[in-house]
Image: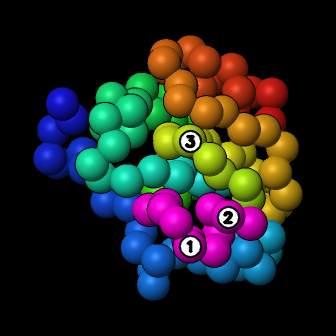
Amino acid sequence: MQAMSNFKPYLSAIEAPSLADVQAMPGTTVLEFGTEWCGHCRAAQPLIAQALATSSDWAHLKIEDGPGRALGRSLKVKLWPTLVFLRDGQEVGRLVRPTTAKEIQTAMSMA
């Protein structure tokens, strides 16, 4: 389990950006959709942290997802965690339920 000092909570529906906000984001961003209680999401946390540690130019937003959550629905998120890779607000890649840091790093390098 990830140490609490490295813990970064998911943004709630109120805190999460809108689709327009996401589309206006400059640079490279990874949106991570999931929930605190999801076993797949919790298992992926150290992998995501490891992959992001290798590239400082990626912004990372964790967004709590669920039924009726506008951003997740507009981006057609179905399983957690889903990582959506953006370049200047446009989706350039996606990874669902990653199982290795290498898999995430590869997706980031292709985005």
Instruction: Residue 47 in the image: state x and y as whole percent.
Output: 42, 26
Q: Mark 2 points at which residue?
A: 73
Residue type at numbered disc 1: Gly
Q: Can residue 28 be seen in this view?
A: no
**From the viewer's perspective, is 93 left or right of 63?**
right
**Above/below status of 22 relative to 7:** below
Residue marked by disc 3: 79
Question: Would you say 59 lies left or right of 45 here?
Answer: right
Task: Return the disc, 1 or 3, that comes first in the chain's sequence.
Answer: 1
Residue 31 in view (yes/no)? yes
The span from disc 2 to disc 1 (Cα, nearest Å) is 7 Å
Residue at position x 37%, y 53% in the image: 35
Give the residue at x 52% y 52%. Answer: 33
Residue in front for this viewpoint, 89 or 26? 89
Type of the residue with mark 2: Arg
Please indicate whether residue 26 sits to the left or right of residue 16 in the image.
right
